[in-house]
Amino acid sequence: MASERILLELKAVGKSFGQNSVLENVDLAVRDGEFITILGPSGSGKTTILRMIGGFTEPSRGAILLDGRDITGLPINKRPFNTVFQDYALFPHMDVAANVGYGLMVRHIARKEVQRRVGEALELVQLGSFAGRYPAQLSGGQRQRVALARAIICEPRLILLDEPLAALDVELRKQMQLFLKDIQREIKTTFLFVTHDQEEAIAIADRICVMNFGRILQLGTPRDVYYRPQAEFVARFFGDNNLIEGVLAAGESGYRRIDTPLGVLRCAIDGQPDLATAPNGARAYAVFRPESVVTAPDNVGADQNRASGTVADISFAGATTVALINLEGGEGPVPARIKIASRVEGVALSPGERIAIAWPVAECRLVLA
Amino acid sequence: MSTALARASVAGLPLERLRGQAWPVALATISFGLPVAFILLPLMAFLTYSFFHVSGGTTYYDLTLLNYRRFFTDEIFLPVFWRTCLLCLEVSALAIGFGYPVAFFLASLRGRKKYALLMMLLVPLLMSYIIKIYAIRSILGGTGFLNRTLLDLGIISEPLTIFVYNLNAVLLTLTALLIPFAVLPIFLSLERIPRNLLEASADLGASDWQTFGRVILPLSLPGTITAATFVFVLAIGDFLTPQMVGGQNGFTFGRIIYSQFGTAFNWPFGAALSVILAAVVILAIVISARFSGKARELR
């Protein structure tokens, strides 16, 4: 498990190409032994961060510290990090054993020792019998595991993974996620994993760093970023959150009111002191998840927000059924999505039906617009 | 339904629409007929001609191995043949030696600079062969650029004659002329190496030299072998360069063949020597294909 000790630190690191800034000045502290995921859409700057840590790209500003020591200008081959590349970057003219042993061989480690450690690494990634194959003779998942074995064999302080699962199909990707997590627990090395896939990030990471527009928008546990988004982008990025626009009103300890077309909603703001001090009248969104909503509530207490509206559309989506509701607002209908557990006989809702809904205040959050 | 759709879209292709009409037959005839008429038939004619023989200025058209026997028994031809093969191997090695660094430099450039330099390298290919030979000869000659530079630097006290009218001159001229043919295949094979392989190598702790020796060099080997073959084949078939810069001492196999068709007027013997030369060329191509194929199949 991750300790609190900081392994790697980015201090006000930024990158510009000419006038074009791809990474604003970013601060990030990676803890020793954690599995941290950098999550963002393409162009968010996530790969730039990885490449700067690996030494493939020079930062335009700021410093990168390893154990508190500045490594900003250190060449790639002098950094105690290894990378799993997006398309694996296996050497096509070497067999699996030579690929995996490459990092040891260039350090002039004795052949016997190399052989032993290659064997161990291949056992770890369950490719023991593939030592003599060439990359062209392997499947995508196998290449992936060779790339991982090649990265871990040098016992780096940090392993960088650049969207390593992007090329795999869904089933294999899920297997590999679990596999990566198991390996990470076993070798206790810090993993920094870059991806654009929210579900993947949630499934795999100890902490998620959400990025967009070259900025870090939120850094926290998967539960944090999922249930407590701190930015509109984060709220929209995870699943199909409902965002109801309004203006901030008075608050009390741990809660804040927001004046929306649906009326005044109460939102939990624990852990976000900035929301407690934001001025009244500031534009913001109330955010709640479709699965937090209950339909036809019996007795609604002060710990619930409520609204009512008309069912516009119902769609079956496997485990859940999604209903689109036009909630009644002051200035016309406000669309919202709710999710109900599916049943074989369908759900007790039909389009055109008027319903009342409620959702817990504790699961209703605020983000500033 | 999807297969019906697929069939419909295939039928919509222009070539497919022509099926069953006269056009495809005509196209096939041309694409197979031209090589047969202009390459295969002349080669066959040559092969046939090599079995005739000339005696006392008269050509006899009965089939015989006399020409081949003469090549292998006469003490003039075999030494020239071996010397020419060796010379062309040297040209090949020199062209690779000079061409590889050039190609490497070219491949390491980015954007417009790369293609500007590539164009400069290719421009000589558009110039007349004879003009290029004259140009190089004037550089190598007694009062040429090379001698004058060496004189000015005080390295020599009088002009050297070792660069003109001998095999050295042929070697240097052929190398200079054929370097572009060496650079291109090497450049292309270097260009095909994915950048992230070099990043992976450095990431795993390799120095630049280690990356070159363990990744770049092996992966550019197929192109390098192709380049060597190109140069060898072009050099061994050349008779004009040795003719113009070789003088009395720079006698090569190509010149012997040329003389059989010219001054000696012995076409059957010239044809036989040409067949032997063609055999060497084919052998070189087969060996090269074997080697570069082996290096390539792993990619």
Image: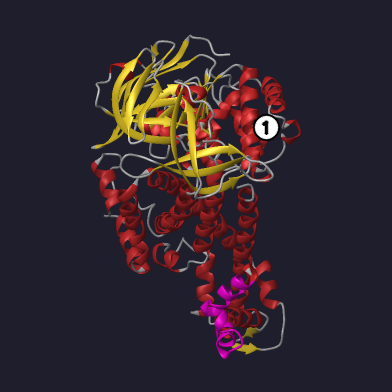
Foreground of the two, B29 or B82: B29
* Quarter holding residue A285: top left
Kind of residue at disc 1: Ala
Q: Secondary structure at mark 1?
A: helix
The coloring applied to the image is secondary structure
Q: Is residue B22 magenta?
A: yes
At horizontal 48% and vertical 54% (from top left) the residue drawn is B185
Q: Position of residue B14 (x, y in %)?
A: 51, 79
The chain containing the residue under callout 1 comes to A
- Decide: is A127 above or below A66: below
* Quarter holding residue B37: bottom right
Foreground of the two, B82 or A229: A229
| Residue that carries the numbered disc 1 in the rendered image | A97
Q: Position of residue A184 (x, y in %)?
A: 61, 21
Foreground of the two, A145 or B95: A145
- Decide: is B258 above or below A66: below
Give the total number of marks visible in the rendering.
1
**Magenta stretch, overall SS:** helix
Q: In the rendered structure, which segment of residues is drawn in magenta?
A: B4-28
Q: Is residue B24 magenta?
A: yes
Q: Is residue B82 left or right of residue A160?
A: right
* Quarter holding residue A8: top left
Task: Answer yes or no: is residue B297 visible.
Answer: yes
Foreground of the two, A158 or B128: A158
